[in-house]
């Protein structure tokens, strides 16, 4: 199973980015977690460019399409999703890349309820399939852990492994449902 992991922050020291890298390292051999590296190259959304989108947007859509699952980890700013993640999602609205696409929503701060709800709402409107059992809140914010610390944290590593196992199972059920037309 291939998971495209999108971070909603451009910060070099982003905790969400660190979490995504840790998840890639914790993933079992049959789950490939690919961090999306093009977030900073996406231009501001402009509907005038949507018919023939810039190459960076075409690449984002192609990577979403090629992935079995999309994982999104994004911080909360001022009770909302970041402009970075909203911009990326806006570029995909007119396409069908998120229609029935299994998505894991990870929240690195259990206090960040507004952004988590807003992200889920946006994805729902775009007809994404939010994998409830694989979408988790992790106490990364304030834990004082670096990437290796996340890997060595029993709580974080166990939660991530459980979420990835749930994602694999939920993805298979979702694929069977789509195949059978129900």
Image (cartoon, rainbow, N blue to C red):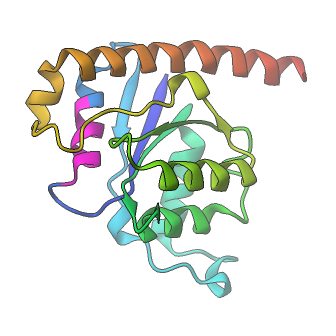
The residue lying at 44 percent from left, 71 percent from top is 83
Task: Give the quadrant of residue 33.
Answer: top left
Q: Nearer the viewer, residue 99 or 120?
A: 120
The residue lying at 90 percent from left, 23 percent from top is 181
Please determine whether, in this image, residue 98 is positioned above or below residue 155.
below
The location of residue 43, given as percent across then percent down, is 45, 78
Q: Which secondary structure dominates the residues rendered in magenta?
A: helix
Task: Give the quadrant of residue 143.
Answer: top left
Q: Is residue 100 left or right of residue 137?
A: right
Please determine whether, in this image, residue 147 is positioned above or below residue 162.
below
Please determine whether, in this image, residue 122 is positioned above or below residue 51.
above
Task: Give the quadrant of residue 53.
Answer: bottom right
Q: Nearer the viewer, residue 99 or 74?
A: 74
Would residue 18 be counted in the magenta stretch?
Answer: yes
Q: Is residue 105 left or right of residue 118?
A: left
The residue lying at 22 percent from left, 54 percent from top is 14
The location of residue 107, given as percent across then percent down, is 40, 41
The location of residue 110, given as percent across then percent down, is 38, 40
| Numbered circles on residues, count | 0
Span colored in magenta: 14-22
The residue lying at 71 percent from left, 48 percent from top is 124
Please determine whether, in this image, residue 153 is positioned above or below residue 35.
above
Q: Nearer the viewer, residue 32 or 152?
A: 152
Seen as rendered, the residue at the extreme bottom is 48
Q: Is residue 44 left or right of residue 41?
A: right
């Amino acid at each position: 199973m291939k998971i495209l992991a999108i971070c909603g922050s451009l910060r070099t020291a982003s905790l969400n980015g660190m979490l995504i890298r840790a998840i890639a390292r914790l993933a079992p051999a049959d789950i490939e977690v690919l961090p999306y590296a093009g977030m900073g190259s996406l231009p501001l959304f402009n509907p005038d460019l949507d018919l023939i989108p810039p190459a960076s947007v075409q690449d984002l859509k192609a990577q979403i399409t090629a992935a079995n699952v999309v994982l999104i980890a994004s911080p909360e700013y001022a009770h909302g999703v970041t402009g970075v993640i909203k911009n990326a999602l806006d570029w995909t609205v007119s396409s069908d890349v998120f229609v029935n696409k299994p998505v894991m929503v990870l929240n690195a701060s259990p206090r960040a309820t507004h952004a988590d709800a807003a992200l889920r709402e946006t994805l729902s409107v775009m007809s994404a399939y939010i994998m409830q059992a694989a979408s988790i809140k992790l106490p990364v914010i304030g834990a004082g852990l670096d990437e290796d610390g996340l890997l060595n944290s029993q709580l974080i590593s166990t939660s991530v492994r459980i979420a990835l196992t749930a994602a694999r199972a939920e993805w298979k059920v979702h694929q069977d449902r789509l195949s059978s037309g129900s």
